Amino acid sequence: MSEGLFDAPTAEPMTGGGAVEFRGAGEHIPLPVRMRPASLDEVVGQQHLLGPGSPLRRLVEGSGAASVLLYGPPGTGKTTLASLISQATGRRFEALSALSAGVKEVRAVIDIARRRLLAGEQTVLFIDEVHRFSKTQQDALLAAVENRVVLLVGATTENPSFSVVSPLLSRSLVLQLKSLSDNDIRAVLRRAIEDPRGLRGEYAVTDAALDHLVRIAGGDARRALTALEASAESSLDGAVDVDLVEASVDKAAVRYDRAGDQHYDVISAFIKSLRGSDVDAALHYLARMISAGEDPRFIARRLMIQASEDVGMADPTALQTAVAAAQVVQLIGMPEAQLALAHATVHIATAPKSGAVTAAIGAALADIGKGKAGAVPPHLRDGHYAGAARLGNAQGYRYPHDHPDGVLAQQYPPDDLVGMDYYRPTDHGYEREVGPRVTKLRRIVRGQ
């Protein structure tokens, strides 16, 4: 079942000196496949997981026994490491793709692995895109993983905490791969340019072109190699410069998954940039979400929330702008609505900040949670029904508009909360004006 997952189509791999050369299909094999590391020595990056004695190194070297979930962005080496694990001595290798395998295929592999185990052979089961397995499919693996009928190696671009069922998660080591650094990507590209498996030194790639390839890769080795190959194929004279790279590669793909943790990471960064008054960072994350096809209604909802949560009364018009942007999204739609979303983003990011509204409602809710919810004072109760007066409801209520100043002394909160200050204005923006007014109003209302 594993045939073809790691091997290039129609190629005969021939090993020599630790490198893998391909005969037959040759140049028809994609460059990222040809350059896949054939040993740990060729792996670039992920040194935090490959130190001496580490679980992953022991697994790759054939001595580890723990199932693992390899979690990280695309192009960071998950499939490569699974391929290296498959070469560990004394193990049989089976591979499934969550895109095409069902419960039937999972159980068939487990049955084969169980028979092999009776003969003393252990099976490594690699599942690519494991986050796409349904709960039923994942549950089918539990007993086999727990009893070590199979050694599971799952690869996922999404945080397993969101996409893998808890029982399977607890039975596996979760190892997070990191995006490759610019130096890592540069090393991968240089090797591909010179290596016999790659471009064999037949192309002259300028330093500026190399820098551009590194920049558009975004830490993804596969993307970098694909862009390099596209650029080389477009070269008529063996020269690769920046103009050729730009003409060959449309744009760097945005790494963002609306169903995974990248969704949460990007929106978290967007919110924190708004709160931190970094308008440029906020616009960057907004652009990432728009480019990735995020639901504009989701973005608009977050902007409305931030207008109250982080700006509040320091600039009361921020909420109006956010609501207006949401209406533009609803009435006009994308792509034009991106202008209104950017408008609201700039307004909120540059507005004076105050968390006083957030703190006020939080404190009030906390008191309610503690049981501080005394009876409504009788003079504030509803008096619009027969018998209300006999109960003392609405008796003695003083109508503020009857007073020349429109405000007068009167008890409004329950007895237990008299004198409680929930809203504490800052001296930021409009709250500089609100603060003294709140202090004056409290003195009048409380008869002080």
Image: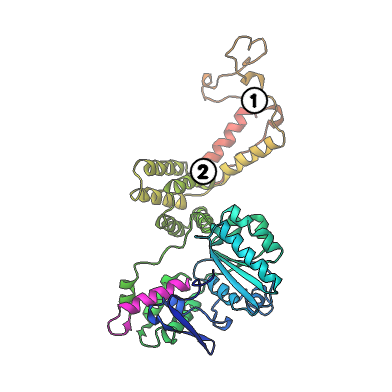
Outermost residue, left side = 236
Color scheme of the displayed model: rainbow
Position of the N terminus by quadrant = bottom right
Q: Could you tell me residue 124's position as x and y percent? A: 62, 70
- Residue 411's label in the rendered image is 1
Question: Does 141 appear above or below 429?
Answer: below
Query: Toward which corner of the image does residue 94 lie, by quadrant?
Result: bottom right
- Residue 90's label in the rendered image is none
Helix, strand or loop status at disc 2 = helix
> What residue sits 55% from the left and 26% below the top?
407
For the question of whether residue 212 can be seen, the reply is: no
> What residue sits 69% from the left and 70% below the top?
117
- Whether pointer 2 and pointer 1 mark residues with C-beta atoms closer than 8 Å, the reply is no
Helix, strand or loop status at disc 1 = loop
Task: Out of 323 and 425, give the one closest to the viewer.
Answer: 323
- In this picture, residue 444 sits left or right of residue 186: right
